[in-house]
Image (spheres, rainbow, N blue to C red):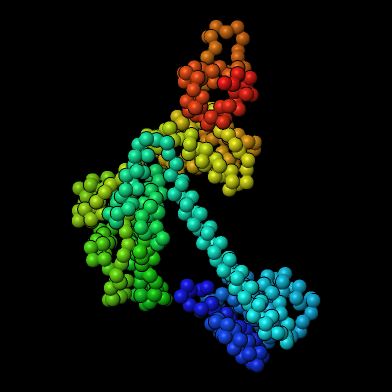
């Protein structure tokens, strides 16, 4: 339904007054809210003003006919089912309407039981589509929680602390370099809080001019400034009952900081151009890649706002400080982008993985993600290799474990075999540990052992 607390809404368009009245009466008795129109122009105008759950339209009308109405709906609101009605039933017109996307086709004079059943089926379809959209969104939310992937002990301790904080309504500041996943951690807090069923809204404080930022955060009234043609709620109101994530909060202009502080203190705001306060119930999570205390000392952040926001600070480590997570994240992104691009990549070569592990990642996880996305786009087979990675990762060091005075050069296969045997020796035969040393997973190591003819345990 267009609103959880209202009746399902039906738009009925027919140029025959008697048919319009009779069908409106029948549908209203079934519990629907019906808007009746005598022509296509009026019907399309109603579509601009109101969200409908179903449209029934006569096929042949003067001016904008039923097929025109159908085509417009398919372009503007394709999830709304359309039932075609006509007194000129023919196989051709039925086929044309169904090909254009009509849900069903009934002819005059129609039986009321038939009309009720077709409408009921269309409403069931509408509800199924709506539930599927909600389910898809829920799956995406679950995926976003699961995508904080780590085996690093420091990160695991941080996540445990984060879960404890999430259960409270404490203000949080997330500190970390660009690309470390600050918004993802903020979403993690939201999804583990009592506000999880309410909205999570993100805003970059340094992205917009002060006046536009005020309108975005606090909303505005119609006529508040040039171009304000309608009342608009801001992100605080959009996040009502949920969480508002303020990224790069230290970049917010000082005048905006004053306004933000007042909203946080008073738990109310006023839209731009309004004198009526709006009560706000929103948890604010702030983030910055800068030291906020240093920003205060430099006069770029208000001291009172700093203390209002900074009840608890969570610091995300740079990716170079959690190198054990690089293979794990690399394979996560490999699966993600392979699915998105409909590729069948299964592995990252040991040479490519070593290069990934050795890199320092000034762009952190976002940069690793970009590397893997690029590699998946360029790779043709099932393995992402060195040639699929950017050249700026530097040259790979190949360790050769053959005697220096070997009579003839060793083959790549022999070097790989010797390299794997050396890793197994370093790991005292522990294959999980050896795979970690090599920068591959245990299954990939098992495949290489089998391919190279190395005896399996």
Q: Is residue 372 visible?
A: no
> 157 or 438, which is in the foreground?
157
| 154 over 223 or under it: above or below | above
Residue occupying the point 60% across, 12% down: 409
> 139 or 373, which is in the foreground?
139
Q: Taking 42 as reference, is 273 left or right? A: left
| 389 over 34 or under it: above or below | above
Percent from the top left, x then y, of residue 241?
35, 64
Percent from the top left, x then y, of residue 269?
28, 69
> 244 or 247, which is in the foreground?
244
Percent from the top left, x then y, of residue 331?
52, 38
Residue occupying the point 38% across, 70% down: 233
* Tally of numbered tags: 0
| 36 over 150 or under it: above or below | below
Percent from the top left, x then y, of residue 329?
48, 39
Give the quadrant of the C terminus: top right
Residue occupying the point 35% across, 48% down: 163
Q: Is residue 427 visible?
A: yes
Image-quadrant location for residue 239? bottom left
Q: In the displayed image of the protein, which residue is found farthest to the right?
A: 91
Q: Taking 194 as reference, is 62 left or right? A: right
Q: In the displayed image of the protein, which residue is found farthest to the bottom?
A: 18
Q: Taking 194 as reference, is 444 left or right? A: right
Image-quadrant location for residue 256? bottom left
Residue occupying the point 60% across, 6% down: 407
């Amino acid at each position: 339904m267009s609103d959880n607390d209202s009746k399902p809404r039906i738009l009925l368009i027919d140029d025959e007054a008697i048919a319009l009245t009779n069908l409106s009466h029948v549908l209203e008795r079934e519990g629907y809210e019906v808007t009746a129109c005598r022509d296509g122009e009026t019907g399309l105008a109603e579509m601009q003003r109101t969200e409908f759950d179903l449209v029934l339209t006569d096929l042949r009308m003067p001016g904008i006919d039923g097929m025109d109405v159908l085509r417009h709906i398919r372009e503007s609101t394709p999830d709304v089912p359309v039932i075609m009605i006509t007194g000129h039933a023919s196989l051709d017109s039925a086929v044309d309407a169904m090909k254009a996307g009509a849900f069903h086709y009934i002819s005059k004079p129609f039986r009321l039981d038939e009309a009720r059943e077709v409408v009921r089926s269309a409403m069931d379809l509408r509800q199924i589509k709506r539930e599927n959209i909600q389910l898809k969104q829920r799956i995406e939310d679950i995926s976003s929680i699961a995508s904080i992937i780590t085996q690093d002990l420091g990160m695991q301790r941080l996540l445990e602390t984060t879960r404890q904080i999430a259960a409270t309504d404490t203000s949080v500041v997330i500190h970390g370099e660009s690309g470390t996943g600050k918004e993802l951690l903020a979403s993690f807090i939201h999804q583990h809080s009592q506000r999880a069923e309410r909205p999570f809204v993100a805003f970059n404080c340094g992205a917009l001019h002060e006046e536009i930022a005020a309108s975005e955060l606090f909303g505005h009234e119609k006529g508040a400034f040039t171009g304000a043609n309608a009342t608009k709620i801001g992100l605080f109101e959009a996040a009502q009952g949920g969480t508002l994530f303020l990224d790069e909060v230290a970049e917010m202009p000082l005048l905006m900081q004053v306004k933000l502080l007042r909203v946080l203190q008073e738990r109310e705001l006023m839209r731009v151009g309004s004198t009526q306060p709006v009560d706000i119930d929103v948890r604010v999570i702030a983030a910055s890649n800068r030291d906020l205390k240093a920003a205060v000392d430099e006069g770029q952040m208000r001291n009172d706002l700093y203390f209002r926001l900074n009840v608890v600070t969570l610091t995300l480590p740079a990716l170079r400080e959690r190198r054990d997570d690089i293979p794990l994240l690399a394979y996560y992104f490999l699966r993600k982008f392979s699915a998105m691009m409909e590729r069948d990549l299964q592995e990252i070569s040991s040479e490519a993985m070593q290069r990934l592990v050795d890199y320092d990642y000034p762009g952190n996880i976002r940069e690793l993600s970009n590397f893997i996305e690029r590699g998946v786009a360029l790779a043709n087979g099932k393995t992402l290799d060195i040639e699929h990675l950017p050249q700026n990762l530097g040259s790979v060091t190949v360790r050769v474990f053959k005697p220096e005075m070997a009579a003839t050069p060793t083959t790549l296969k022999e070097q790989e075999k010797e390299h794997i045997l050396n890793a197994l020796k370093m790991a005292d035969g522990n294959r999980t540990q050896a795979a970690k040393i090599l920068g591959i997973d245990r299954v990939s190591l098992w495949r290489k052992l089998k391919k190279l003819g190395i005896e399996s345990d």
